[in-house]
Amino acid sequence: MAESNSLSRRMFGLTVRKNAHPDIRKLRREAGDASLHGNKFWKSSCLTMDYLKKHPLKKGARVLDLGCGWGLGGIFCAKEFDARVTSLDADPSVFPFAEYHAALNDVAITTWRCRYEKVTETALREFDAIIGTDICFWDKLEGPLYNLTRRALKAGVGRVLLVDPGRPPFRRLAERAAEKLDAEYSEWQTQRPMKATGCIMLAGS
């Protein structure tokens, strides 16, 4: 039986379930509500995927997906670049949603429960690239994410890509990284598969 398009969306080669889909409703009952906003698809994920389509990672890259939520950025990297993806979040209730979408799209991810400030320089040496979408939504997150970016560059991570709709904490983070870490900070937008606008911070190459 064909599935109604009202319950799923296609974007950048991925199938993403909507909140009304029976599987997502079942996961919500089983996993409970996410406590740190990792409770749904965020439009900024389109910006991350669009940017990576135009500036691809190397095949087989080791990718850390910060504040993964449903894990779509990392899943895209696994699908598009055959990346080895670790999906990190402080809230373990998001992992069933990320693992579900990974399986739905025929890729594998590894989950890691950790807070940003606990990610050590030694751990960061295991990654080639870091991505993060919609993760700097509180003032108190600016410092830990700046420090993580600094540690990542020191550890030899080639690319740190953070994407946001343009909230003030993220803009301060990006401006600080541009000034002190030689990061690039720019506006980004895409029209398809849905209209999304925001900001990108790129540290490294």
Image (cartoon, helix red, strand yellow):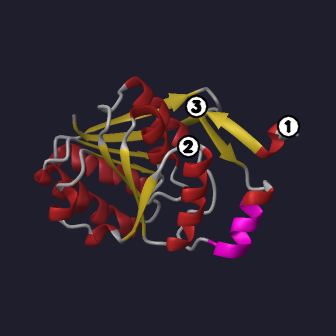
What residue appears at the point 27 percent right and 72 percent down from the top-left corner?
A: 118
- Give, as a three-letter code, the residue at label 2: Asp
Quick one: SS at disc 2? loop
Q: Residue at x 36, y 34 (%)?
A: 186
Relative to residue 31, is residue 98 depicted above or below? above
**Where is 142 relative to 103, above or below?**
below
Tag 3: amino acid:
Gly
Residue 13: mark:
3
SS of the residue under disc 1: loop
Numbered circle sitting on residue 2: 1
Pick whichever, 160 or 70, lies toward us. Answer: 70
Location of residue 98 in the rendering, given as x and y in whole percent from the top left corner: 55, 57
Q: Position of residue 23 (x, y in %)?
A: 74, 58
Prevailing SS of the magenta stretch: helix
**Amino acid type at image mark 1:** Ala
The numbered mark at residue 106 is 2
Q: Report the magenta residues as a range.
A: 24-33
Q: Real-space Cα distance between discs 2 and 1?
A: 19 Å
Q: CA distance from mark 1 to mark 3?
A: 18 Å
* Residue 37 visible to an observer of this rendering: no
Residue at 16% over, 49% down: 153
Examine the rendering and report whether any part of residue 24 can be seen. Answer: yes
Q: Quick check: is 196 in the magenta stretch? A: no
Q: Earlier in the sequence, mark 2 or mark 3?
A: 3
Q: Nearer the viewer, residue 178 or 158?
A: 158
Which one is closest to the eye, mark 1 or mark 3?
Answer: 1
